[in-house]
Image (cartoon, helix red, strand yellow):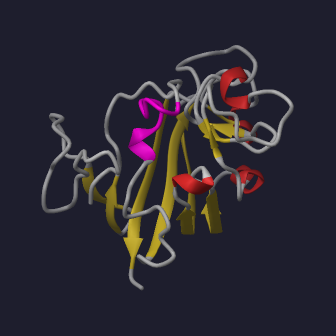
Amino acid sequence: MAFNDGAQFSTKDRDNDGSDISCAYFQHGGWWFNACSSVNFNGRWASRESWKGMRWSSVTGNAASGRFELRFDFTYQGYDYYATYDTFVLSGESENYKFWTSGFDGNVWNVMAFNNGASFSTKDRDNDGSDISCAYYQHGGWWFDACSRVNLNGRWASKEDWKGMRWSSVTGNAASVSFSEMKIRPLDK
């Protein structure tokens, strides 16, 4: 697998990300692949720096390329949380990377359901359904629909309202998780 910009994506057979650790690993009953990099998620659309870790060519428009599962893992105040979706679809750039999930399982409320069908927004490309730029106001590119109850791309360790890395049913709106990971894996067709 490769990012749309040509950067290699790690797989179970090959570690292509250039980091000191493998970013493909066996966990939760199967192989997971993630961006595994330190990325500034408050960048601009054109620079792709804010979200290149989420631009997987094999995932965008994936109705034809197979089925994918999406999993969020995060830690808040020493407790681990997860949300898994057994169906994950991400449209291409022409549709602003619209995001769809179904088949929720987890130990948190499914607050990502409010983002279903939302387009990806960055601080300079406002694709959300709000009168304000949610990506600018909430400090990070995300799939906002009239802003959001979730933004795991917010400002690290922020306690400022709506700015942090949050899953609102767990953190509220003025706290940040201490760890988060968003990962995908292909499922059998």
In the image, is residue 53 part of the stretch drawn in magenta?
yes
Residue 37 position, x and y percent, is 32, 34
51 sits to left or right of 77: left
Q: Which residues are magenta?
A: 45-54
Q: Position of residue 66 (x, y in %)?
A: 43, 78
Q: Residue at x 73, y 57 (%)?
A: 113
182, 143: nearer the viewer: 143
| Above or below for 71 versus 22 | below
Residue ID at (70%, 34%):
126
Camera-side residue of 93 and 52:
93
Which quarter of the rendering shows the C terminus? bottom left
Q: Where does the image place residue 39, in percent across and percent down from the top left?
A: 39, 28
Q: Main secondary structure of the magenta part?
A: loop
Residue 33 is a magenta residue: no
Residue lying at 36% horizontally and 69% vertically, measured from the top left: 29
For residue 80, above or below residue 104? above
- Closest to the observer: 66 or 175? 66
Quarter of the figure with residue 139: top right
